[in-house]
Image: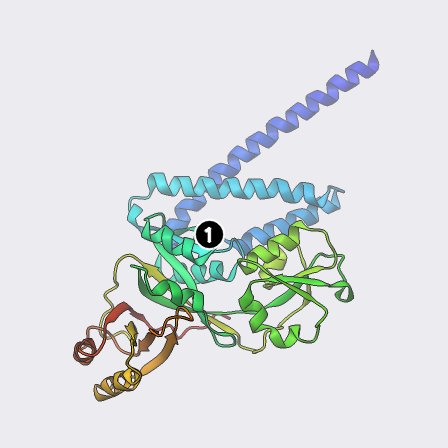
Amino acid sequence: MKSKKTLLTLRNIINTLDYDLVTLLYKRNTIATKIAKIKIKKKYPIRDIKREQLLLNNITKLGKKYNLDYNYIYEIFQVIIKNSISIQKAWIENNYQKKEELKSFSLLGNLGSYSYYAVQKYSERNFEFFSKNYYNNFQEIIDSVENKKSDYAILPIENNSSGYIDETYNLLKNTKLFIISEINISINHCLLSQRKTQFINIETVYSHRQPFMQCSKFVKYFPHWSLKYTDSTIHAVQQLSNDENYTFAALGSESCAKIYKLKIIAKNISNLEKNITRFIILRKKKQNVPINIQSITTIMISSGENKNLIIKVKNILKEHNLEIKRLKSHIYSQSSKNAKIFIDIKNNINTSQMQKALKKLKNITSIKILGCYPEDKYLNN
C-alpha cells in the first residue's frame, strides 16, 4: 500500500514538472516572437547558426554535469530551436508589412554548405529577411527560379585553384535568368571523420569534384585512398555523419564539423592558402546598376566558324577603352565546333562606350547579355 502511495506521489511530481516544462516552452515561444520583432528592426537574418551552435554546446555540457545523455539533450534542443525558428518565420510572414522584401534563395546542398555561407553573406548585405530552398544539382536550382519557386539562384562559377566551373557555364547558355551580383567566399577545406576514426585507418574519402581538385596536392600523398564523388560537399559530410564506418572521411569546412559533430583530422588542406570561390546570384529580372558604381557586364557570344572572332572582339573592346576581366571559351560537346565565349567586361552596360561597343559586336556575332552587376572586391575572412 505504501509503495502504491509512493508511486502516485512520484507521478504527481512528474506531472507537475511536465506542466512546468510546457509553461516554460510557452514562455520561450513568446520570447521568440519578441526576437522576431527585433530582427525586423535591426535587419538581422532569421537564423544565427553560431548562436544555435553555442547554445547546443553549452546546454549539452550542462546535461553532462547532471549525467544526461549527450544525444538526448542535443536532439531535444534541436527540436526546440527548430520550433523557435518556425515561430519567428510565421510571425514575420503574418505581420511584416513589406512582404515583398522576404526573399528566397535556391542553392546547392544544405545547412553548412559553401553555397549556404555565400547566401548568408549576400543576403545580410541586401535584405532584412530571407529563406533558403536546397537542391541536389545546379539544373534544379536554375529551374526553381525560372518556375518562380524561388526569387534567386546562387551558383559557384570559378575557383582560383581549380578554375572555371563548366557546369555553371553550361547552364548560362540557355537560361533566361540574369546575373545580378557576384560574391567571393574564402574556402577552407578540412578532412573530416567520425570521432573514433584515426588518420591511418582512412580508406575512402567522399566529396564533390571541386574540393578534390582544390585539395589535389594533399590528396596526392595518399594514393591508397578511394575517392567517391557526391552531388555536393555537404552531401559528402552528411553521408559521413550518418555512417559509423571508421575508415570513411570527407572534405568539408570547420563549420560542418561542428554542425554534424565530426572530427577534424586535418585543416587548411587546399592547394592555395587563399582559396577563393566566386559565386554568382541570378534572378528573372535584369538589374539596373547606377553608372557611378564599379560594375561588371557579362556577355556571351557564339564563335561559329570564325576563327578570328576573339581577336576581333578584343580589338573592338580595346578601341572603346574597355577592359576584359575574364574570357572563357566553352565548347558544349565534342562534336560541336561552335564554342560559346563568355566575357566579363569591367564597365557598366549603360555607359556610352559600352553601348557603342555592343552595337559593333552585334554586327559581327550574336550576343546574349547575361547581366550587369557590381564588382565584388570583398573576401570572406
Coloring scheme used: rainbow
Can residue 349 be seen? yes
Going by the image, does 214 lie left or right of 72? left
In the rendered image, the vertical position of residue 184 relative to residue 318, given as above or below: above
Q: Residue reaching furthest top?
A: 1
Whether residue 128 appears in this view of the structure is: no
Mark 1 residue element = strand
Closer-to-camera residue (192/81)? 192
Q: Position of residue 359 (x, y in %)?
A: 16, 77
Which residue extends farthest front? 335
Tell me where residue 194 appears, x and y as whole percent: 71, 56
x and y percent of residue 57 in the render? 64, 52
Q: Residue at x 65, y 66 (%)?
A: 191
Please indicate whether residue 37 sits to the left or right of residue 297 in the image: right
The N terminus appears in which quarter of the rendering?
top right
Q: Furthest residue to the right?
A: 2
- Residue 308 drawn at (x, y percent): 29, 85
Height in image: 322 above or below 275?
below
- When asked about the image quadrant of residue 322, the answer is bottom left
* Residue situated in front as seen by the camera: 208 or 381: 208
Mark 1 crowd level (few <14, some 14–19, many ≥20, 10 Å Cα): some
Q: Which residue is mark 1?
A: 135
Q: Nearer the viewer, residue 368 or 323?
A: 368
62 or 160, which lies in front? Answer: 160
Give the tally of numbered discs: 1
Residue 21 appears left or right of 115: right
Which amino acid type is shown beneath numbered disc 1? Tyr
Q: Is residue 61 above or below residue 219?
A: above
- Residue at 31 percent of width and 71 percent of height: 374
What residue is rendered at 37% in x and 71% in y? Answer: 336
Which residue sits at x=36%, y=41%? 93
